[in-house]
Image (tube, rainbow, N blue to C red):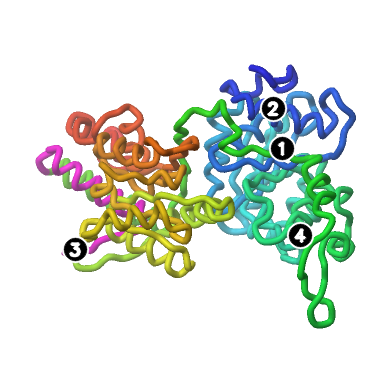
Amino acid sequence: MQGTSKKSSGVLSVTPYKHQAEAIEFALNIMGYGREPPKSKSCAVLAEMGTGKTVITLGIAGTLYNDGHISKMLVVAPLSILGVWKNEFAKFAKYPFTLEVLEGSRQKKLKALELLKASPHKLQVAVINYESAVSIEAELNEWQPDLIVCDESSKIKGHNAKRSKVMHRLGKVAKHNIILTGTPITNSPLEFYSQYKFLDESIFGKSYFVFRARYAIMGGYGMHQIIGYKNLDDLTSKAHAIAYRITKAEALDLPEQVDTTMPLVLEPRAESVYRMVERESVAELESGEVTAPNVLTKLLRLSQITGGYLKSDDGERVEEISRAKMDALEHILGECLEAGKKLVVFARFIPEIDAITKMLRKSNVGYALIKGDVKDRQAEVDKFQQDPECKVFVGQLQTTGMGLTLTAADTAVFYSLSYNYADYEQAKARIHRIGQKNHCTYIHLVADGTVDEKVMEALKSKKNMADLVVDNWRSLFKTGGQNN
């Protein structure tokens, strides 16, 4: 493919898109492993959601590993997307690696870090969230990662925040650093400073106050208030000297529709409840009549649990037992809002929809809503399409499948999934239709080791769950029963 260097070929299990190959080559050149003298030890990949910044990073890391430049890689990311890194490595890395997600108690994190040391002949990859990195900074520093990746680097845009200072210290001792974000600045150009201090102190210097004096106009009481900015051409030039920028609009080789799965791990209590209900479901089916409605009823309850909610047996009470999907949605929403984009969210169950809209109100994010009891649905569509303050459309899958135009967004999240393939395809078509000017991205929130994965597999095969459940019903349950 055009743009792919010999150095980066063969490290990925897929052929990268042109913009991805060019980003890999750009980063290698910046770091001095290409045709040009090194400009920095580090690189920024400023890529919009849906353009494949994780695959780009895997290409860079694989090339550096294969050429003997790195042996240990640390990925620091928001908690909700740690599973994405595990998934993407397994799917796309064509070089030997061993990966551990550092989570749980402090003891468990350190044990996982020790496990990596047992594989000296593979790229050792540690994946951790920002808060945990703060808590085991000394041990991570002692481990001495060669490459540190700061995913969603806007998390360290505050130069004085504790997590930022930890990343600055870790970044200083690493051989190479990478930041990944679609929006490096959201409120002020000065937000570049902290992220670039992690990357390479030589770009903007070691002092925030010297940096601020160069690029900010101070005023107000005691001259302590930023009232404007100056020298922004210089700031932008320095920032982009080591940055590769990708927008969906510019990534012309992307397919019109990109499907991504965001794997999530249920919290211990939610996992325990899920497995208990799963075992009970298998026992009831084995002792009773196995029909499609019976199996689907059991699976429906499991789907409700992965969405975070458990109904009492009498249906009178609903208890929240997981926030895994909500945390992931808040992360995606933040990225979209920072990029100035709107978002569509599809969910199947009313408790999920109620929780999503409650979160949006609490965050002061304007939204439109269509579910079963909403009468004037066109008014909600018009609000989403035309009102710039209406940032999110929330739709119940069963009621938003047909006839609606939601092209004000190019990204849709499937919070939960219908078991009907036709409903799923119709929902996807709400943003991918006449009037859409951008490539469309669909993000599926899928809890690891649950019915979510089975539903996703069925939909990818263009099948309805109802057509699969009777003959192979045991394969839909992970625990309990025979042959499991």
**What's drawn in magenta, residue-wise?**
288-314
Real-space Cα separation, disc 2 to disc 1, in angstroms: 9 Å
Q: Quadrant of residue 177?
A: top right
Residue 289 among those drawn in magenta = yes
Q: On the image, numbered disc 1 is attached to which residue?
A: 244
First of labels 2, 3 by sequence position: 2
State if disc 1 and disc 2 touch (CB < 8 Å).
yes
- Specify the amino acid type for callout 3: Gly
Residue sitting nearer the eye, 69 or 16: 16
Query: Residue reaching furthest bottom?
Result: 221
Q: On the image, numbered disc 4 is attached to which residue?
A: 190
First of labels 2, 1 by sequence position: 2
Tell me the residue at 56%/26% (across/down): 253
First of labels 4, 1 by sequence position: 4
Tell me the residue at 17%/47% (across/down): 284
State if disc 4 and disc 3 touch (CB < 8 Å).
no
- Specify the amino acid type for callout 2: Glu
The answer to whether 348 is drawn above or below residue 59 in the figure is: below
- The circle drawn on residue 315 is 3
Real-space Cα separation, disc 3 to disc 4, in angstroms: 52 Å
Q: Position of residue 372 (x, y in %)?
A: 21, 56
Count of residue discs:
4
